[in-house]
Amino acid sequence: MTPNDPPIVRLKGVTKRYGATCALNDVDFACHPGEIHAVLGENGAGKSTLMKIISGVIPPTEGAIYLDGTETTLASPRDAVARGLVCMFQELSLVPDLSVRENLLLGAPGSGLGRLPKTAIARAQQVLAQIDGRHISMRARVADLSLAERQQVEIAKALARNPRLLILDEATSALNASVVDKVFDLIRAESARGVGVLFISHRFHEIEALADKISVFRNGSHVDTFANGAHDYSAIIGKMVGQRIDDLFPPKSPADPDAETVLQLEGFGWGEALQDVNITLRKGSIVGLGGLDGQGQAHVLHGLFGVLKNTSGRIVLEGRDLALSSPKQAKQPDIGIALLPEDRKTEALVLQQSIRANMQLAALGTDGVRASDPALYQPYLDALELKYATLDQPVGQLSGGNQQKVALTKWLALKPRCLLLADPTRGIDVKTKTQIYGLLRQLADAGTAILLLSTDYEEFIHLCDETHIFYDGRVVRHLQGDEVTANNILSAALNMPATEMGAEVAHA
Amino acid sequence: MRDFLRSNRREVIALAVLVALLAVYLGTHPRGMSTYVMTIWANQCLILALAAIAQFFAVIVRGIDLSVGAVMALTNTLASHVLGGTGIELIGGAGLVLLVGVLCGLINGALVVFGRIQPIVVTLATASIFVGLALILRPTPGGQINYDLADAMTLDVLGIPTALIIAAMVIGLFWVPLRRTGLGLGLYAIGSSEQAAFQSGLQVRIVRMASFGLGGLFAGLAGLYFSFVTTTGDAGIATNFTLNSIAAVVLGGVALRGGVGSVIGAFAGAFILKTISALMFFSGLPPLAQPLVEGLVLAGAIAIGGAEILRVRNRLEVFAR
Amino acid sequence: MSTQIRKPFDLVVAVPFAATLVLILVGSVFYPQMLGLDYLSQQLQIAAFLGVIAMGATIVILLGHIDLSVPWVLGGAALISTTLAGTGDPTLTMLAIPAALGFGALIGCLNAVGVVILRIPSMVWTLAMNSILLGSSVLYTGGFNPKGEASGLMSFVATGRVLGVPMAFVLWMGVALVLALVLHRTGFGRYLSAIGYNEKATYLSGVSTPSVLFAAFAIAGVCSALGGVLLAGYANQAYQSMGDPYLLPTIAAVVIGGTSILGGSGGLVGTIGGVFFITLLNSVLSVMQISEAWRNITFGLIILVMLLIQTLRRKEG
């Protein structure tokens, strides 16, 4: 393991194009044995494309791949695994309808279409035991596992393949801190044995804790590679974004406590999953819904958009009781509720259809709106600076940030009086974030009432006027004014008294 | 055990329904549980079961095969030409019939894998071709099968219907071992998530080809067994068997979205379907009402399977595939 | 008229029309009468039967679904209309066509109940529906060819001519035009293809997806029933299994016309081309007086070639 060893994998002049979009542009990159190499960049910077090329999922359009100094073509993931390049994918590579055991056997090295060698199982079980996954039954169907359990299995599966280069693409996003520590111990042990590790994560402290080297990507180009610690946090962010972002959030307007109430939830509930929620949404205010994933906050949005059956309690809109049974009813101007759903690709947009068709889909069938009128959409396209070739371009060709702009425009065109947003900035680049924040503030100032579900507590602090924190289907805290601090938000999310958390959060 | 029941729920239900139906059938039949009754019942069931297995291999990899009946027609008419002799000729003849079946399946597979056309459309077109070939072989029903061979395959051994022995062999000697191989796993993996299967290093194209090849093999077996039961060749059987094979796999708990189900389920579905018809025959229902009752039972069974969805309280969940 | 592709004469849509033209030209080399007006107008009439059914099938396939109940909706409609007309009672005779179409709409709605409310795959549920209808008609007719006859109006729309143009063809074009207007003037066409691509996102855009599915299946049922009325008018009777030969050619016509079997993209214009192509192909094959066997084989091969061409076109596009 001397520095003179050839890198396990080296890319030279690699470019990947999808039609007109260039996902990777003339990239040189290398990973050496025994090195833990973090890859940083915003969404759409080309990290995932890079990983897919190294793991044989897609071929590069141009350029060469060298393994141990020899030029090689990777024909398929199978080919890559046979050469010791093992990837743990962000979109999990587990087959949902098969058992854990079968997934571990599937495509393991040395397996063909005939008898399956069982060696992988023992190694995987050993790994699972080390990362708190002992309870996961080998016979359980993967579809029945939680996301965290699936990630544990995925890690075990990857390590059981005896990688020479281990690629982790957001491998630990659903795992809690203590499990993540154990995974890191494992990764360090692998690296000490001479295994190279490529590591993509959005959690900065994870990268600081683990990486030897850091490479930054931006817009499909490899910007820089440096040793961990060579640059500080803000310098690295600068490299990622390519420009200084002074103010992520627009200045907050003072909330008007006497503004008229637009929407009121009284004792709102939905079976066991959501109980006794009371929220008041005033004209021009932005109200946050926070908490850990899946504590019921998403049900509030769905309930307000007519998606849930058998809700209890009252929804009062400008003084009248609402009984909502469909999104179609909710979007009509007499009600005027709009929902930007959580999953852009499967819920918010029809990817195969054009920008225009997507924008018009919500306006179609809304009373008093002429969907074909371009003037409905233009102001929002301008405000958000949507980048597009023509409006006939399929939405699927746009970057994630631009897709989100289309999804927002589609609903804003209806001029809803109440806008429901489910984590609108998840996985979106910083520039688009500032544009979205700016627009939301403008909308609120113009009188729209906004309910914002978020997983980013910064948004509660800097954008929202007040925030409700959910735990186990109930609102556990209602934070207003000075109370809205990182400390309070996090402790409430874990349903702990604020004081206990203080010290821990301060350095998180 | 709980994991097993959970992941094989559909098959367990199908088998339970089958046992109940069979009990009623044998109870109501005037001649009761005689070898004769059992043999006739098992023969009819096995023909459809083999066709259903052919369909299973298309459905499990998220496809559908509209040519199952056509391949049966082709292999059946071929058998009526090559299975009339004796001894070694018979072995060669049966081999040829099955080879043709596999070939048909591989043609379908190649068009799906390399032509990138949806299986439903591919097999719609190839079905027409296969039926045409069958019509060349037998413009009108006729021909003959060696009676000794036909008897050996369709009567009984020590009172146990040969058809049931064949069924047991298909499950025990073919399916159970296959399920444990890389190919067996691969079939489910492709149907459940092709992307995950590919990223896990599965040879997706080869597995899919193999799946269609196996489908062709079983359609050929179904045609062959049909020949043993009827001892003639008939090119006109295609449509009926295709549609019934789809109904059978659905009743047997094989999900049309792929990745879920098993050959055992396909067997159970086919046996259920045929047992219902047999029951009807002896139930005293007027013969003219039988097709309607059969249709209603089929629709009812499917509807009950779907009724679960009515309990869903989040309207978005119905869109999950 | 395509709902997704804006250019009216997209290549995918043009393929079946071009292929039809080639078929006529090549055929006429051997059989000059193929260029005659008599022959062509007769083909328009025959194409109309398949065409009317295929209009409805296109709509269902755009949704990403399929309707396998075509044969017995067609057969049932023929049976109902000829039975009513066969009574000789003027009121019942007048009701023959509306009753048949109403029957088609009803079955379409029942299809939708299974597909929309119980979420049963349409391929399975419509197949079950088909066997129920088959069973009902066996029970009703006693397994014999039913008595009854076509009404004057039925015969006229099926076999009559207006200024030398077959009435059936005029009717088919009328149906196509009405549907095209509905698809374009209302959001219906948009909804169809949006649902075909992504039903969940469409629902969350505030589209009443259940209503769209119900309407689509009902339209398909009415189209199949209309096909049955035309065929009964043409044959002056209903007969067992009269719909069976129409199921697969319908699907073939839709797919050759460039509509994706997975839903989303495609449209009525392409299907019209597909219907012309299938009809002429059948006709050419029978004019050539080859056996049924070879007709089947050639038919299958040519469909495969067309599918391969369509797949290639789409990949380029």
Image (cartoon, coloured by chain):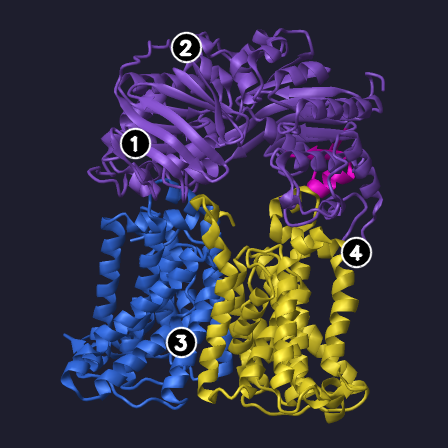
Chain colours: A purple, B yellow, C blue
> Can you tell which mark lies on residue A481?
2
In the rendered view, would you say A350 is above or below A488? below
Q: Residue at x 79, y 33 (%)?
A: A129
**Where are the magenta residues, as a range?**
A70-89
Q: Amino acid at mark 4?
A: Gly
Q: Position of residue C83 (x, y in %)?
A: 27, 85
Q: Residue at x 82, y 17 (%)?
A: A4
Spatial CA span between label 3 and label 4: 46 Å
**How far apart, in angstroms, are the residues tagged by discs 4 and 2?**
65 Å
Q: Secondary structure at mark 4?
A: loop
Residue A114 numbered mark, or none? 4
Q: Amino acid at mark 1?
A: Val
Would you say residue B211 is visible in this rendering?
yes
Measure the C-alpha gap from mark 1 to mark 2. Answer: 25 Å
Residue type (three-letter) at the residue carrying disc 2: Gly
Q: Is residue C134 left or right of residue C93?
A: right
Q: Is residue B266 visible?
A: no
Mark 4–mark 2 contact, CB under 8 Å?
no
